[in-house]
Amino acid sequence: MAASNFITLAFFITLSFSSMDVTLGAARRLLQTPSNLPTIPGVELPPFLTTPILPPITEYPEYRLPPFATTPLGPDTPTGFPTVPFFAPPAVPTDP
């Protein structure tokens, strides 16, 4: 079982290094291409559309939230957290 894990790990490491080598080789070939590439004739684009200028907003609408619903607190409603009792640690035996 452990041998198959090592073989799988070795396979993935080899695969990652081989793909890195291919990537570096392709980058090296691209850097060695001549810099005088032929120019492509340009196409004239129409002018960009302009957005209309909107007048400034002088008044903002006022938003109000409804009041929160309140629940009446009766005599049986707890208002705090209950306390957790702490017990004393067990006594440590003494060596005679």
Image (cartoon, helix red, strand yellow):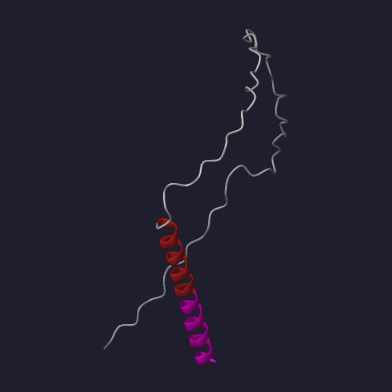
Q: Position of residue 41 (x, y in %)?
A: 57, 36
Q: Which sits in the foreground, 68 or 34?
A: 34
Q: Position of residue 52 (x, y in %)?
A: 66, 14
Is 37 on the left or on the right of 74, as rendered?
A: left
Image quadrant where one finds the C terminus: bottom left
Q: Position of residue 12 (x, y in %)?
A: 50, 78
Inspect the magenta stretch and tell me whether residue 6 lies in it: yes
Inspect the magenta stretch and tell me whether residue 75 lies in it: no
Is 83 on the left or on the right of 32, as rendered?
A: right
Q: Position of residue 47 (x, y in %)?
A: 62, 22
Instruction: Give the quadrant of residue 46.
Output: top right
Residue in the image at 30% along x and 83% along y:
94
Q: What is the chief secondary structure element of the magenta stretch?
A: helix
Q: Which sits in the foreground, 22 or 84?
A: 22
Q: Which segment did they paint magenta?
A: 1-15
Residue in the image at 50% along x and 76% along y:
15
Q: Which sits in the foreground, 18 or 56?
A: 18
- 71 over 17 or under it: above or below: above
Is 14 on the left or on the right of 67, as rendered?
A: left
- 42 over 5 or under it: above or below: above
Image quadrant where one finds the N terminus: bottom right
